[in-house]
Image: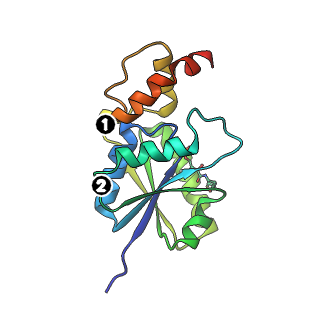
């Protein structure tokens, strides 16, 4: 019998968007177990704490059964080896993402040959969404309610002043 396939969708998720949710829902259907891995990067200034990012991801993915939200530090491939994860899921929005994603996929393959990267094209209706653009347009009071889960919208509204000051 084939062993269950464990995959991970890793990122900064600062914050999680509807584009991420689309990739999570689709990859949860492809693999037996899907971890959503939030990178702890002490060198990168983030809007939300790691605790808040984990909470928002848990809230907005609670409808998906085979998903678990975790955080990791250091190399993603090391986390995968330690946790028996064999697939890295990445989403691409446009050709602008492809070069970077291929470079990461090749580097991760070089680091550990047994772990494969699966690249999913983002649903076209979310192809323009990024966490940083959402923060930027919100700072100009744009309506972003179609772009992020409800719980994220509430938290972003609370952070609006902080975003504007940046
Ligand atoms: O949210 P992002 O920027 O698309 O996520 C990128 C992420 C977290 C997947 C990538 O930067 C990563 O894996 N970082 C952990 C350190 C690492 O493994 N670097 C080598 C990548 S080839």
**Which SS class for mark 2?**
loop
Q: Quadrant of residue 29?
A: bottom left
Q: Position of residue 70 (x, y in %)?
A: 50, 57
Residue 22 is situated, as x and y percent measured from the top left of the image, at: 33, 45
Dot 1: within a 10 Å radius of its alpha carbon, few (fewer than 14), some, or many (20 or more) residues?
few
In which quadrant of the rendered image does the N terminus lie? bottom left
Counting residues from the start of the chain, the first of labels 2 and 1 encountered is 2
Q: Visible in this render: residue 80?
A: yes
- Residue 157: horizontal and vertical position, in percent? 44, 23
Q: Nearer the viewer, residue 70 or 84?
A: 70
| Label ID, residue 114 | none
Identified at 71% across, 42% down, the residue is 43
In the displayed orientation, state which residue is furthest to the top: 140
Q: Which residue is mark 2?
A: 64
Q: Is residue 125 left or right of residue 81?
A: left
Quick check: can you spot residue 121? no
Question: Label 1: which residue?
Answer: 124
Please tell me whether mark 1 sits on a helix, a strand or a loop: helix
């Amino acid at each position: 019998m084939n062993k269950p396939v464990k995959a991970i969708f890793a990122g900064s998720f600062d914050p999680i968007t509807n584009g991420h949710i689309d990739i999570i829902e689709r990859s949860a259907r492809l693999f037996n177990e899907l971890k959503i891995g939030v990178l702890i990067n002490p060198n990168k200034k983030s809007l939300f704490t790691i605790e808040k990012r984990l909470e928002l991801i848990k809230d907005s993915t609670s409808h998906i059964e085979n998903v678990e939200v975790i955080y990791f530090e250091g190399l993603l491939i090391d986390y995968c080896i330690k946790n028996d994860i064999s697939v890295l899921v990445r989403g691409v929005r446009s050709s602008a993402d492809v070069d970077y994603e291929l470079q990461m996929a090749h580097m991760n393959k070089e680091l550990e040959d047994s772990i494969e990267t699966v690249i999913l094209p983002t649903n076209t209706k979310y192809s323009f969404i990024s966490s940083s653009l959402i923060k930027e347009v919100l700072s100009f009071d744009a309506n972003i309610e179609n772009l992020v889960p409800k719980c994220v919208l509430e938290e972003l509204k609370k952070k609006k002043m902080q975003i504007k000051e940046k």
